[in-house]
Image: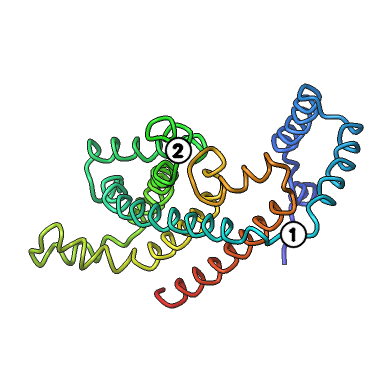
Amino acid sequence: MSAPAPDAISRQPFRTNWGGRFAMLAVVLYTIYAASHLGFSWDRFVSGLGQGGTFLARMFPPSFERWELLRDGMIESLQIAILASFFGVLLSLPIGLLAARNLMPVWVTWPARLLIALCRSFHPIIIAILFVKAVGFGALAGVLALIVGSIGFVGKLFAEAIEEISLKQVEAVRATGASFFGVLIMAVQPQVLPRFIGFATYQLDSNLRNSTMVGIVGGGGIGATLFTAYQRFDFDFVLTILIVTIAMIMVAEVLSGWIRKTFQ
């Protein structure tokens, strides 16, 4: 058995990644620089802990006296989330299909991808503010805002799922003389359906959370009730709203997990 070469013995088993180290150092230095220019200080953090403790003390015990107002707000948030998820996912189907580069020509995919990027560019709260200015306060503004957000999220993931399918099945169905819609139904749909169900259930779960946020800016739902209670310093009722909201999100998480296991 031949002895290893001298240069192989002297060679380091793990080379030092100086580029990665300099990048990490640059990130740390910029973090310190940004924190120094944003007014962060230890005294401010400590005083904030004391004020936060006082605020939490005023929230206990939770108050369920106005349960009718709480019930109506939660039902409205649930309705906003379901409507936004249904129409958002429904509109995401053709948009995601048009954005798939393995099935559509370039002159079709680029406008579709531009629309998806536009829908993803802004947070739902920003979009909700625009719709509140356009259609007024209420659930309609919240539904429209969440529809836009759903198109940006589900449309992008659906397009990527189509681009990852096996083209062998597509070519096999095309060889039978099937039409374009026949190819979609027989070759594309079976490959993307399980993932699409996962996307849809996750978006419903996300819209349930976002429906509480858009209400703060006038989009209806429990968020409007939460904002009103906070302005009136009804912190015990604020805690009640938060507890019920968390319970609703947890139930939705369990249901979405069950749906994914059932249909995937």
| Nearer to us in this view, 246 or 175 | 246
The residues bearing labels 2 and 1 have C-alpha atoms spaced at a distance of 28 Å
Mark toward the start of the polypeptide (2 vs 1): 1
Label 1 neighbour load within 10 Å: few <14, some 14-19, many 20+: some
Residue 84 locus on image (x, y percent): 39, 52
Q: What's the amino acid at mark 2?
A: Phe
Quarter of the figure with residue 233: top right
Pointer 2: what residue? 137
Q: Residue at x 55, y 53 (%)?
A: 209
Left or right of residue 238, residue 186 in this image: left
Q: Position of residue 228 (x, y in %)?
A: 62, 43
User: x%, y% of residue 75?
Assistant: 49, 60
Amino acid beneath label 1: Pro
Please name whichever residue, 189 or 28, is drawn nearer the observer in this view of the structure: 189
Decide if residue 133 is on the left or right side of residue 231: left
User: What is the quadrant of residue 83 in the picture?
Assistant: bottom left
Q: Report helix, strand or loop for mark 1.
A: loop
Q: State the image quarter where residue 216 is shown.
A: top right
Residue occupied by mark 1: 62
